[in-house]
Amino acid sequence: ASSPSPSKLADAPHRAQQTLAHPHIFADAAMAAVATVSSAGGILAMLHEPAEELKLHALASLNSVVHLFYPEISTSIPTIESLYEDEEFDQRQLAALVVSKVFYYLGELNDALLYALGAGPLFDVSEDSDYAHALLAKALDEYASFKTRASKATEEEENVDPRLEAIVERMLEKCVLDGKYQQAMGMAVECRRLDKLEEAIVRCDNIHGALSYCINLSHQYVSHREYRCEVLRCLVKIYQTLPHPDFLSICQCLMFLGEPETVANILDTLISGSKDDALLAYQIAFDLVENENQAFLLNVRNRLDSQTPGQSNPDSGSALPVDQTVNAGTTSTEPAGDVQMGDDTTTANGNAHPVDPNEAAHADKLAKLKGILSGEKSIQLTLQFLYSHNRSDLLILKTIKQAVEMRNSVCHSATICSNAIMHAGTTVDTFLRENLEWLSRATNWAKFSATAGLGVIHRGHLQQGRALMAPYLPQSGAVGGGSPYSEGGALYALGLIHANHGEGIKQFLRESLRNTSAEVIQHGACLGLGLASLGTADEEVFEDIKNVLYTDSAVAGEAAGIGMGLLMVGTASEKAAEMLAYAHDTQHEKIIRGLALGIALTVYGREEEADTLIEQMTRDQDPILRYGGMYALALAYRGTANNKAIHQLLHFAVSDVSDDVRRTAVMGLGFVLYNEPEQTPRIVSLLSESYNPHVRYGAALAVGISCAGTGLSDAISLLEPLTSDVVDFVRQGALIAMAMVMIQTNESFDSRVGTFRRQLEKIILDKHEDTMSKMGAILASGILDAGGRNVTIKLLSRNKHDKLTAVIGLAVFTQFWYWYPLLYFISLAFSPTAIIGLNSNLEVPKFEFLSHAKPSLFEYPKPTTQQTTTSAVKLPTAILSTYAKAKSRAKKDAESKAANQEKTAEAESKANQEKSTAESKPSQEKSTDAESKAKTTEDASGSTSGEAAKTQEKDGDAMQVDGAAEKKAPEPEPAFQILANPARVVPAQEKFIKFIEGSRYVPVRPAPCGFILLRDTQPSEAEELVLTDAPATVATGAGNNAAAAAAGQGSAAMAVDDEPQPPQPFEYSA
Amino acid sequence: MDPKLVEVTQLIDRFKAAFKASNFDVCSTLLSQLKVLLTKFPSLPPVFQQTPNAVEELKLAREIYEQAVILSVKMEDQDAFERDFCQLKPYYMDTCGIIPPSSEEYPIMGANLLRLLVQNRIAEFHTELELLPAKALDNAYIKHGVELEQSFMEGAYNRVLSARQTAPHETYIYFMDLLVKTVRDEIAGCSEKGYDYLSINDAKQMFKFSSDKELQQYIAEVN
């Protein structure tokens, strides 16, 4: 009948405790103990006292013991709540605080937060307790999610609880005061409070650090594209108010925001400034180029053009021509002209003429800048680097070639493709030249691929590209000996050479497209055009390709679909709807597939904007369009790790009825997650054990794509079992994926790389292996040693921006499932693992830096030694083995020692030579086999046995010498390594790179990768250049100075270019 | 001596004087003043801060609450009894021997047991009992309550009703009176189920009423 009494609640839980602590039992022992209350009953009773002061006191006491007695207090919550609701009670907030704490301990965070808000200022954000932390986190979450909701539904203006806002603001304020700026910035970004973000950054002691932190933050954690733009805009605004703005970062932001105007302005200001500023401008340009956003770079370049006449020409209309004559035309015609020279001459003339020398310097710098922005400079330097550092292992190819059956055209063209990948961008085509006859077995589409492969090998050979391909290109008017296959392949190859830098070749490709009606040539031309004008959204080109599409020819139409996609990459234009409509009209699956991929390409990187289109495609009845929808999803949310996208992809991966869609959905995960490669193996691990081989295949490639070039241990562990899957195409996918993961990782970094190489060799040599997995192994060997072992697959640039070309390349590459020639698209994803230092003239000076790691960790894989081939051919070496040893030992007693000594010196000289052969000692059974053969030869040449014995003895000595030499061999490995500019630096090595203090050149930006501009601290002294193209320019003359880029290496490269192109047009006229 | 202590001691003296004079209104005003003053003492539960005056303060506080409990009986206010007793309890249970046991402890504990019995809160009654040490059960005050409860449970209501005479403490009388009412309610509840009808005489005997009038009055109250 009575109201719930406090004592009722008080007793039960603490009975045992109370009995123990009861004063009457343990009176003596307890004297020493500190008295504590065993129940909150007393305090709770006090709440019912009529006097205000007592209630207050009780609340205060409760507040201090709530962590101990929340179970008791919880039953009295109604009482305390009524105090909180009592308008006249003057400590309502305290009551709210107590209730909030109780709710917190009961795990009712929502209620806890509600009352904590009621507690107002009493809720102490700086309190270092679990309660405060948990509630703050909760409050931030609430606030952030509220703000996110509010930003989505703008029309219904919900008002945030001002108390919540106050708490968050107090929290932010406190973080700033405590110097925890990063926390404050993170929270501000999360809560969409750009005003607070700005405040936090401005108040921070290290504004530059804070800004770069924020940029990182916005890319990694801000999943909503529009909001990210807002954040970046805010950051740019802050950057611009700084006295020393960090232009490198600003321009990166601006690129993301798509504001070429501002970038052009900044660059223009910089090159008008001091020499150091110009260096910075170059550096910015290189960094922008790294992100491969062709359309943006083009815009910047055009803006620079339009600015220059406004600024420099009017007041120095005559200055430029004069300068040019003085400089003998070096400044404008040759981008890498000698600036020091130019400067000297202009200043010399400046005294005589009333000409502003600055103008000339400015024009010169502008030319250089544009050279960089066009991508030519970096491509040229990359080409030089890849050529000079090429370490490809021809023996591997030779082994493959010999192991592959002649009639098996799949493996045959895979081998050609593997060769192309291995030499991608190196311009080294020795293998093809040495095997012309073998090469000519490629017919029809294989010939198309083989020709296209040349494009991969010569990738980036912008100036010479067309000349190189000339023998295969369709001859307008002339009868043209070439088959349409090689002509089509050549056009495709031109596209690959000029991928993303196709200004020069576009016109030619368009003409070729228009002048032909052969669908194979159209096919090649469409791909080529797409590649060359990647992402430029050129209307005319689009019309040309569309005309091909409307011929409704399956072969040409497929390429046209992809070509249109490539052209419109990331534009999200309404052309996609047009393409979709046609995809519904046509009967040809090939065309539908091409268009589906093409549509997917158009929404590249558009995130939420693409949702409507994705929805449309993924709901289509046609599985091919759903398949395209998967690509669209993957590409629109590429590298965002967006939860919604992952969720959707996973859904399709397990629920769609079409295997193709499921495979692609899983594969798409790789694209979505490539910014967080560590996540991928975890996410797809279950899928990799699916009963459905298509899903397993997709899982393998997803890991391959997202973890490409990382050598991530988890990824390798996941792929390892898949490489011996029961289904052949799963093995194929796993092998390729593994190669992608392991690219540029050597055996001493991860021992499994060596195992994998051996596995590849085994598969290739195994006669009974399925063709599919054999092809996978062949391609994998190519990818593993791609680009002369100097490139890796990188989908993110240094600034965590996505590399458009690389991602697109991989996306189309995965399409090889249906169409092998698309394999070559992987070459777009390759980026050189190099540090190239440049001086203000954009030349490569002599410069050294330190790699603070064991050299063996990152060195090139050891070249394979002759194994299978040697044992058969080099019989004499077999004599060296056990047999020779035994023989020599037997003879030793009989022979005089004097004779022995005579020969020692001679033997020693041979020692080194033989050491290598001895090392390549064939396996056990082979040696015995050889022994028996050796015996027979010895028997046959009975008369010369004496001589033979002598040589054997020599060999015996040599063996001893070898032994001694080998003992010395394992010296302690140095812990560091000096690298000379330009150097191969694999991604994992970058963190070990240190620039040597006090060296002549100082890098403009500290990050050690890619192109680095170096500030010369001793400008007066003569510079020593490493890669110089000056002599080549002289040699080739003014008219051909464009050739300088690649030809500058030296006579070898020159020879390549001068010779008539070796892989002659194939003789087969099928 | 601490001025606060002095003030409290003086107030207690005034309280006691008023109590003797049975001036309960004055008592309760003084009491609430005292309670407010007590909140200023840091050594009291739940803080138990170890100050030099801790023993004095605790003793005073305990005395005040003991007086408060007794006063509440006098004023026949069960809620106040419960409130004050709960606040008093930590002084008995949790002081860990900082202060010597009070002479009033068992009488008050016993009274509390009676109160629970009166309010028919048997579960809590036993809980309280469990908290007491074994030897406390021999104490006359406690024993009284325990025996009453046993009789109550057995249904030996006449023993319950006759126990009023043997009450060991004057404060118990109040509860014993109430207990009669509780017992009658119990009987009424049972007989309602047990009998279709009862004669006046039987009922009078069963409910231990001396006159018909009292019975009529009770029936009117229940219905």
Image: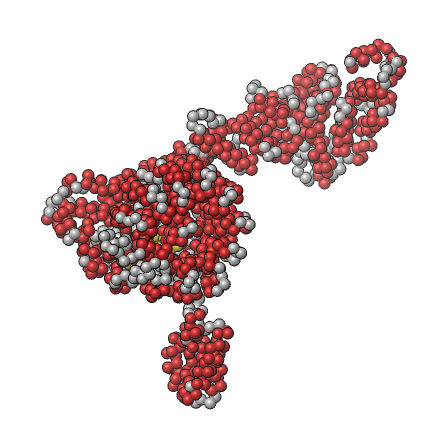
Q: Nearer the viewer, residue A701 or A638?
A: A701
A257 in relation to A769, above or below? above
Extreme residue in the top direction: B213
A876 in relation to A868, above or below? below
What residue is rendered at 60% in x and 24% in y?
Answer: A81
How far across and how far down the image is residue A588, in percent?
Answer: 40, 44
Extreme residue in the front direction: A1070
Residue A734 visible in the snapshot: no
A586 in relation to B193, above or below? below
Residue A479 visible in the snapshot: yes
**In this picture, residue A807 sits left or right of residue A770:** left
What residue is rendered at 49% in x and 26% in y?
Answer: A161
What residue is rendered at 48% in x and 74% in y?
Answer: A926
**In this picture, residue A590 sits left or right of residue A331:** right
**In this picture, residue A202 sits left or right of residue A359:** right
How far across and how far down the image is residue A208, in percent?
Answer: 36, 42
How far across and how far down the image is residue A381, in percent?
Answer: 29, 55
Q: Nearer the viewer, residue A1037 or A235?
A: A1037
What residue is rendered at 22% in x and 42% in y?
Answer: A305
Q: Nearer the viewer, residue B217 or A983?
A: A983
How far across and how far down the image is residue A60, in percent?
Answer: 59, 28
